[in-house]
Image: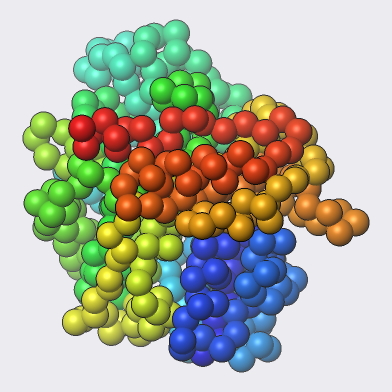
Amino acid sequence: MRVLVIGSGAREHALAWKLRSDSTVADVLAVPGNPGIARCARLTAGDPADPAAMLALARREHVDLTVVGPEVPLERGIVDAFRAAGHAIVGPTRFAAQLETSKVFAKDFMARHGVPTARYRVCGSADEARSVLRGGSFGYPVVLKADGLAAGKGVVVATGAAMAEDGVRGAMIDRRFGEAGARLVIEEFMEGTEASFFVLCDGRTALPLTSAQDHKRVFDADEGPNTGGMGAFAPSPLVTPQVAARVMEEIVRPVLEGLAREGHGYSGFLYVGLMLTPAGPRVVEFNVRFGDPEAQVVIPMIEGDLAPLLMASAAGALDGAGVRFSPHPHVGVVLASGGYPGTFENGKPIAGVRDAEQLDDVIVFHAGTALRDGALVTAGGRVLTIVGRGASYADAIGRAYEGIGRISFGGMHYRRDIGRKALEWMS
C-alpha cells in the first residue's frame, strides 16, 4: 500500500512514523512534511489547502490511501474531491467538518440532536454580544468562542466584564482571528475537568480508540494564554471504562446518527473535547482530525498495523474491527519558541535531537523545524514534541524530561508540569 500523509506538524510526523512501520505499507509520502518526517517518508511539494492539487498528486503517485492531518484541507472539501474521483481518503466531508470549522454549526447541531454541551447564545455583532453579557444570564466566568478556525486560540474564558469586553472587541471589531470572529458564541462556563476522547469512524460505525489530557495554557499550572497545545499524556485516568461507555452512547452515537439523518455520514477521526462534570461528560468542542499534541502520545500506543484500520475507515468497513493499545502511559512535552503563542523568531539552531532519540523509550516528533545549510533550525511556534513512555506515569514523565535535557535552542520554552495531573489523580 502507498500512503500519502498531508500536513507538516508533529501530528503528521507521528502518523508517518507509525505508517512507515506497518507491514502493509510499502511507501509513505508526505506533503509538505518537515525534516523529521523526511526520515520516515518521501517528501513532495504541494499545497495541502488545494484539494485539486492534492488529488492530482495522489493520482500521479498512484497513492492507495490519503490521510489528512490539518483542518484547512478538510474545510476546503478535500474529502469530497477525493471521493468523487474514487480515491480512498481518511477524513470527513466538508459538511461534516463543520463540527470543528464552525462553532455555531457545532452548537446548533448538538442542540438539534440532544448532545450534552454548555448552554449558549450565538451573536452576530459586538453590540449583540455586549447586550447578552450585560443581561447577566451567563454570569462570570463566561466562555467566548470565535465561530471559525483560529488555530486553537479563538477561545477566551472571561472572569469579569473587562476581560469579556476585550474578548468581544478582539474577535468582532479588531478581527484578531480574521473572519473567524465574524460571529461569536457565548456559552456558560462548565465546572469540571477536561479530557479528550478519540474514535475512528466510517460513516456508520465508530471504533473507540483511547483518551488523553491536553495542556492548552502556555505556562505551568495552566496559567497564561491558550496555545495549540503544550503537551499531553495518555490515557487519562479519569476516562474510566464507564465514562468511555457514556461518551460513546451519549455523544458519539448521537453525532453519527444525527449527521446520517441529515444526509452526511461521518468518517475519519473524531476528537471529542470533554468536560467531565458532576452530571456526566459534556462536549467542550470537536476536532475532525487527530489532535495535536494528543496524536503524538496516542499513536505510539497503538499495537499492530494502523493502515488497515485507516483503509477500513475510508471504505466504510470498520464494523467488527478492533485495535490494541499498549498498557504503558505516554507523556509528550512540546518545546516551543520563546514568545509563543505571541511573536517569536525563527532560524534558531537546534542541538541534541539525535542524542535525545538515542535514549530508551523516548521519541522525538518534529513540528516547526527546517534545514538551513544542512543544520536543523526552528521554523515555528511549536518546534518539537518529546514523548516518553514507561510502566507508570512517573516513568513516562521522567523519560520525556530526560529527553528534553539533551535538546537546546535559543529561547526554548516548555512546561515543566506535563503529566503531573495524572500523578495527582492516581494518588
Question: Can residue 151 be seen by looking at this rendering?
Answer: no
Q: Is residue 160 above or below residue 263?
A: above
Left or right? Give the position of 13 relative to 119: right
Q: Picture coordinates of residue 62 (x, y %)?
A: 61, 91
Left or right? Give the position of 111 relative to 422: left
Q: Picture coordinates of residue 107 (x, y %)?
A: 29, 43
Q: Residue at x 58, y 68 (%)?
A: 6
Left or right? Give the position of 263 relative to 341: left
Picture quadrant of residue 328: bottom left
- Nearer-the-camera pick, 130 or 93: 93
Question: Can residue 158 be seen by looking at this rendering?
Answer: yes
Quadrant containing the C terminus is top left
Q: Residue at x 44, y 8 (%)?
A: 162
What's the colour scheme? Answer: rainbow
Q: Residue at x 23, y 69 (%)?
A: 206
In this figure, what is the number of numbered marks?
0
- Nearer-the-camera pick, 161 or 183: 161
Q: Picture coordinates of residue 232 (x, y %)?
A: 42, 44
Q: Residue at x 66, y 81 (%)?
A: 57
Q: Picture coordinates of residue 241 (x, y %)?
A: 13, 54
- Nearer-the-camera pick, 149 or 224: 224
Picture quadrant of residue 426: top left
